[in-house]
Amino acid sequence: MSETSSFRRLNLTGRLAEAAARRAWLTLAIWLAIFLIGAGLFAGLGSSLRESDAPANSFANRPDSVVGAELIDTAFPELAAGQELVVIRSQSLTAPDLDYQQFVVDLEQEILALDGVVTSTHSYYATQNPAQLSEDSRTMIMPVTLADEGNPTENVRELIAVVEGANGQGGFEVAVGGEASASLTNIVASEDSLITGERIGGPVALLILLAVFGTLVAAGLPLGLGVAAVLITLGGAAIIGQYRDLSLFIVNITFMIGLAVGIDYALFVINRYREERQLAPDNMTAIARTGATSSRAVLFSGLTVIVALAGMLLVPSTIFQSIALGAMIVVAVSVAITLTLLPALLKLLDHRIERGRIPRLGRGARGVQQGFWERVTATVLRKPLVSLIAAVALLVALALPYATMNLGMTGVSQLPSGSSPRTALAILSEEFSPGLLSPIEIVIESERYDTAGLNNSIDALKVAVEQRQGTTVESITTSADGSVTLVTLNVDGEAESDRAHETVEDLREEIIPATFAGVDAEIYVTGQTAFSRDAITLVEEHAFRVIGLVLGASFLLLLLAFRSWIIPVKSILMNLLSVGATYGVLTLVFQHGIGARFFGFEQTDNIMAMMPLFMFSVLFGLSMDYHVFILSRVKERYDETGDNEAAVIHGLRTTGRVVTGAALIMVAIFLGFALGDFVQMQQMGFGLAFAILLDATVVRTVLLPASMRLLGDRNWCFPHWLEWLPKLNIEGDAACARIAPAPVSGAAED
């Protein structure tokens, strides 16, 4: 069998790259059609991915909070769309003043004029309810019931527009708060965060690509392919969004992960192609060699990322499943583009990929960076034990604040400064109670024949609740058919406050079981705080399943790829240290506020409940990316020479420049998204950026070479009884990679 036929049989990615390059125009046309369809679908249907951020929509299972909310919608249809509180305050006038009264009446009429948006309002002047007026009579609250028709997001948008138009008139401060307005504010903040991420991350990524490649064409290609992967994915997600609920996070996450991974994969392949093009006799040979080596690494890296992300699908939460779905699809699309479209473009461009050379960039930077990484690696290898201990000590120290992490959901106080719901919360906190914006609701479903026993239990519940400091029963309402009773509680604290969380826990675990003992009724505690408690429980219950899947699958893939049990164990341990350190710094910055003001971040009372599990899955996938690319080069050289130390130096030297560039691109993109006002994206973006930076510095430059040096040839230990396992051979066979493909006679470029 000839060497050429062996190459063709053994290297699927090489043959795929060669086939795509042979039919370059056809490949380009197919991907262009896919891109136009995806972009068109996202433009036409993409709004379905951003319409709602309601807490109940984040659960794919049915905890008590969701069941209770559904019962309220069914039994009290007038409350189905929700209720907003309009807050009115004057520094100079009081409620008895005619000017104050005229302002409120005019505002009420303007709100009621929102036909199809609002069903009713209840001003103090109509109800004479003292609970609607502050002690100094300068602040008034006016409940507004939204209509249960049309688009709820657009409905509350109209209400907010009226309120913001009235704000400042006649010296009055006017704001509106509630679940719907908070949800819309989150959606707007998410969109603004997306724009900020694009404006900052894209240009910075281009500058880094210019520094790595030194030419405009080579630098622009990865960025363009990354954008294409994102828009194709969002088009597919828009179709899925027509049939199932998806979280608004899917758009931001797809952009973040898609740009980062899409650019990086193209960066790795183009870098290898430029190396091969200098040695190969023609363009097709360089493409085939690149396909047989770096494209295989891209394929395997993408697979590891997808497997790590798949763990989040196990969590019955729309947020987790949306993030996993969007990220997995965009990684798969990025891999497909890199393996097919990129070789076709390289064939069409050929030497033109070097056009637009920027003086003093590229070649000069390459030599400097390769020398730098060689010196760093040599320094670590001279004192591997000291380096290893120092690096581990640093990561453990950074991880210590993780012990103080509080999980929860971001509340109204973490909405962007100046937003109407946050202003309303501030006024309510001063003059009434912040709990008015997010009451705790107890839903009691019972048969009508047990009315006496039920009433006694409700009376006992009221007594027990009001014995708690800062907690009162605001209202008790019974449905028209008498089967559902709604008890609304006001806690003197925001929904995510410790007092609110403790109240929900006590209600579920102590008060309700005691007061309703022996009563034939189903009782559900719902509301924002209850949703938050159920979200935390959901994460805790599924954490071990997700972690087990990610660790097990990562171990198996690395075992097959490197034919070593030491490599996967060591890689997993290093990743766990990196993730732990990221958790600690995330807690330090956002929860304790250290450095938050410097970055312009919002300090929070807790870390979003989904964040640890989300970051574990994403970071394990992304950090394995770098390990795969570096270790594949190390293994390639070790197989050639049998010299472990020389292989480590070679692997880090040859990948140092491109991996550093790839890591900096990810950091730039993630930080770009973190610099918006959306606090959830601040936590996500900063956490991912810090973890990648940590992985590309401490882990890759110290832990990896030091551990490789200490273990020596033991790095490549593989039990004989596992020899039956398939060999993935990530970088392809080195000898095969040097074989030129058979001449292409009359190859048509379709």
Image (cartoon, helix red, strand yellow):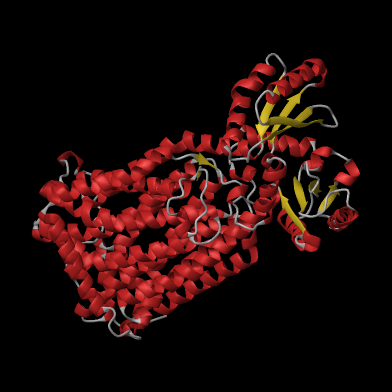
Placement of 671 over or under 223, stated as above or below: above
- For the question of whether residue 564 can be seen, the reply is no
Residue lying farthest front?
Answer: 92
**Where, by quadrant of the figure, is residue 465 drawn?**
top right
Q: Residue furthest top?
A: 518
Q: Position of residue 540 (x, y in %)?
A: 47, 35
- Of residues 723 and 176, the one nearer the viewer is 176
Residue nearest the viewer, comparing 420 with 219: 420
Please state which of residues 593 and 248 is positioned toward the viewer in this rendering. Answer: 593
**Please, is residue 656 above or below residue 482 in the view?**
below
Q: Is residue 282 above or below residue 709?
A: below
Q: Quadrant of the C terminus?
A: bottom left
Left or right side of 378 for 329:
right
Residue 652 visible at all = yes
Report x, y in % for residue 382.
10, 55
Q: Quadrant for the N terminus, please.
A: bottom left
Is 375 left, or right, of 57 in this rendering? left
Residue that appears at 45% across and 59% down: 598
Q: Is residue 547 above or below residue 165?
A: above
Residue depicted at 23% across the width and 70% down the height: 369
Q: Where's residue 90, x and y in %?
A: 78, 54
The residue under the point 60% across, 69% down is 40
Whether residue 737 sits left or right of residue 592 in the image: it is left
On the rendered structure, is 627 left or right of 151?
left
How many marks the image carries: the answer is: 0
Relative image position of residue 249 (x, y in whole percent): 55, 54
Question: What's the residue at 39%, 62% (across, down)?
Answer: 667
